[in-house]
Image (cartoon, helix red, strand yellow):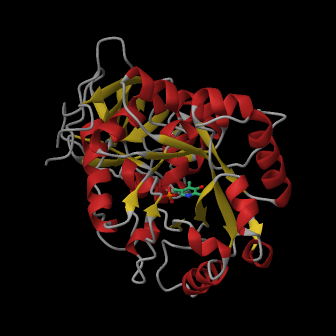
Amino acid sequence: MSPPAAPAAEPDAQAVLTVDLDALGANWRLLAARAAPAECGAAVKADAYGLGIDAAVPALARAGCRTFFVAHASEGMRARAALDAAALPGRIFVLNGFHPESAPFAAYRRHGLDAVIGSPEELAAWRDARAAAGGDGLPVAALHVDTGMNRLGFPLEDARFLPLGDLQAAGVTLVMSHLVSAEDPAEPVNARQIAAFDHARERALKAFPASLANSSGIFLPQRPVHDLVRPGYALYGGNPTPGRPNPMLPVVGLVARVLQLRQVPAGASAGYNGRWTAPRPSRLATIALGYADGVPIGGSGLEGRGAQVFAGGIPCPLAGRISMDLSIADVTHLAEGALKAGDTVEWLGPNADVDALAARCGTIGYEILVNLGRRHRRHYIGDGTGA
Ligand SMILES: *Cc1c(COP(=O)(O)O)cnc(C)c1O
């Protein structure tokens, strides 16, 4: 499949975000094949990494995904509504734990959500809520064991000695943990976490299916895929193997309109605080995309560093600070007339993947994706079954 072509902006759209749902589905199938015979789920927290949970969840379900992970119960409700609207099945786990004061058990039950339990208090509260609710078809739980992140999850030695009866009363159906540095296979913490997870599962927890790997975890040489993998970033086109070729298809395109072009003399400055100075007579393009549109200000074009946009496939460095709604690119090297006001330039797409843009902005691709925001016109391509 060829990468999605960046669409021409519509007449009144200053920036257009394209999400290729067929590429998303194809990425899920690629990861599912790679993780087989383990099941492949999908992390769709933070609005499916900024791409739109309402569109992403049905597309993933059409591709074959049956297990989804969100951070908040409210995200789970949106995922459930999206599945219901498409008449598609799936279980939805809420990663951040069971906190009845913000989302009571009744909400889990009503919306068909399952909890990821990460502490003795949560386990007791979940077990009591299930007992009080009674009846069939109650929400179930995954038990989260901490193997080194020190963020969420049961302390390892506590988890090891949980009585099977307590786990069954809480409806535990999955044991999971989370990798700290899966994107770096040379990092010894990977082997330590894999061993710790095995150690946790020597006793009662052995009875349950297990899940450890995120996107990069699927590609670790140890292949810690267990029974279920939980990729997020790679589904959306991010590279799960940094420093090696990206095995995933691009999912996201972002183009923005050129509002003005101007010629400036050598020595002229551009942007707030005049942080860029023209080294020679220069042509500058003002682009309708700024940090309010999700491009980190760290991508500003200062001291020879910063993000670049592509005009007809040719990279053009940013000139000066990124503003809230605008940025400026140095297009002096383009052929005369190659770029006109009204044309679009590419921020993300066939020439510019999310990892490359992130590196130029001094951040990670995850942060680029989740900050893309709702300001752009959005185009969804396909439905998860094509590509
Ligand atoms: C976000 C998350 C994932 C997905 O991680 P990626 O690196 O995006 O693949 C998996 N498991 C947990 C617990 C997470 O929080």
Most extreme residue toward the top, as rendered?
Answer: 12
Q: How many marks?
A: 0
Check the image and report above or below for 199 versus 163.
below
Q: Residue at 56% of width from left, 66% of height from top?
A: 208
Q: Residue 286 is drawn in which quadrant?
A: top left
Q: Position of residue 340 (x, y in %)?
A: 25, 25
Query: In the rendered view, does 8 fall on the left or right side of 107?
Result: left
| Observer-nearest of 177 and 277 | 177
Determine if residue 349 is in view: no
Question: Residue placed at 72% from the left, 49% from the top?
Answer: 97
* Furthest residue in direction left, as rendered: 1
Q: Is residue 341 visible?
A: yes
Q: x, y (%) of residue 343?
A: 27, 25
Quarter residue 336 falls in: top left
User: Ligand 1 shows up in which quadrant of the image?
Assistant: bottom right
Left or right of 28 in this view: 359: right
* Image quadrant in which you'd find residue 380: top left
Q: Residue 249, image x and y in percent?
A: 26, 52
Residue 280 in percent (x, y) is at: 39, 48
Side of 224 relative to 36 (left or right)? right
- Residue shown at 59% from the left, 64% from the top: 176
| Residue sitting nearer the eye, 271 or 287 | 287
- Identify the residue at horizontal 39%, vertical 48% (top origin): 236
Quadrant including the C terminus:
top left
Residue at the front extreme, as displayed: 135
* Residue 307 or residue 58, whichever sits in front: 58
